[in-house]
Amino acid sequence: MPAYRPPRIAASEITPERFFLDRRSFLAAAGGLVLGGASVAHAAALKPSTSPYKVDETLTPEKDVTSYNNFYEFGTGKGDPAANSQAFKPTPWTVKVDGLVGKPREFGLEELLAFPLEERPYRMRCVEAWSMVIPWVGFPLASLLDKVEPLGSAKYIAFETVVRPEEMPGQSGYFQPLPWPYREGLRLDEARHPLTILAVGLYGKTLPNQNGAPIRLVVPWKYGFKGIKSIVRISLTETAPPCTWNLAAPDEYGFYANVNPAVDHPRWSQATENRIGEGGFFGSNRRDTLPFNGYADDVAGLYAGMDLRVNF
Ligand SMILES: Nc1nc2c(c(=O)[nH]1)N[C@H]1C(S)=C(S)[C@@H](COP(=O)(O)O)O[C@H]1N2
Ligand SMILES: [Mo]
């Protein structure tokens, strides 16, 4: 089988100032408008308020947050998303919300950016046993759900990533690492928990393409793969929706995917993690993984009475 080779952008073509901020985009963002038509990812400044939901740990450097990524639509290597996503167009954008809701509708990006935005530095833990602390900018998913009025029969929520093979090299070509669209899901009470946010930015600016522009899910007590990127559809359902990694390898990736140092991945331990951007030659960047990624006080109650070895 031929190796999959995503088209490469020469390093010299990638501007070192990826977060170049021009006056027009700054004004557009400040006015709640979206800059249109830019084919290169230009970050715009956001104006979040501070949040009580923050962790008091050293932030992972921005260059690590934006260059060490998982986003298989752009390739399976950690550097692929940054290298291969620069032609992706996150504007214009709409998110369709449907299923078991009283008021199904579409939200334009302008409207999504107009929700009261908060800066939330969250501890993030990938199932591959590395972690970061990322200052997300976003708003509670519950605020969006309130606008569509979920029906009493809605018990779960399903998310889908955009399918755009012409802009996403991992979705075209002979070898495709996953079936598309990338899908994820939560129980509705997890979705409504105040820690669960839709992120539209990080480090005070709109999301870089490689981090899931223009809008992605962040659920800090779960493994990172639950944090689906570049969302185009949200559906309320009665039964648990199919989730990409759970479908691909059900023995390795459960529906819940709560961070749990006591339940190892079949092929590696989940007891400790490597904090990206720390350590180096002499220091250690290995630390213990915390139950629910350190958010147990907030979320353990959601799983009262459940066997978390069975529901992993
Ligand atoms: N659509 C989509 N969303 C995705 C992924 C992906 O491959 N495709 N990878 C997931 C995984 S495994 C992780 S760890 C996080 C990484 O988010 P970050 O690159 O912003 O840190 O995105 C998640 N969301
Ligand atoms: Mo991950």
Image (cartoon, rainbow, N blue to C red):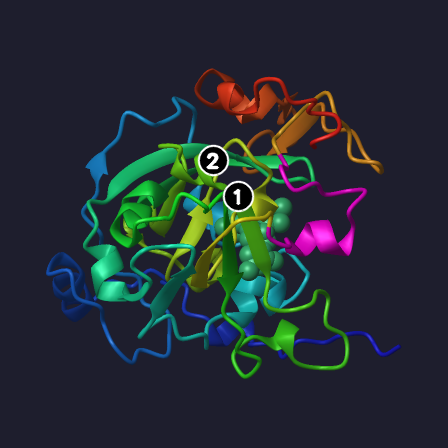
- 149 left or right of 22? right
Quarter of the view holding residue 308: top right
Is residue 25 or residue 89 the one in the foreground? 89
Tag 1 and tag 2, C-beta contact below 8 Å: yes
- Could you say where residue 255 lies in the image, as x and y percent from the top left? 65, 42
Taking the spot 28% from the left edge, 38% from the top edge, the residue there is: 119
Q: Is residue 199 above or below residue 229?
A: above
Q: State which region is magenta.
A: 241-257
The residue identified by callout 2 is 190
Q: Residues within 10 Å of mark 2 (few under 14, many from 20)?
A: many
Does ligand 1 reach within 8 Å of label 2's beta carbon? Answer: no
What mark, if any, has residue 186 been given in the picture? 1
Taking the spot 37% from the left edge, 65% from the top edge, the residue there is: 95
- Could you say where residue 34 lies in the image, as x and y percent from the top left? 22, 68
252 falls in the magenta region: yes
Taking the spot 48% from the left edge, 47% from the top edge, the residue there is: 65
Is residue 311 or residue 296 the one in the foreground? 311
User: Which element type, helix, strand or loop, lies under badge 2?
Assistant: helix
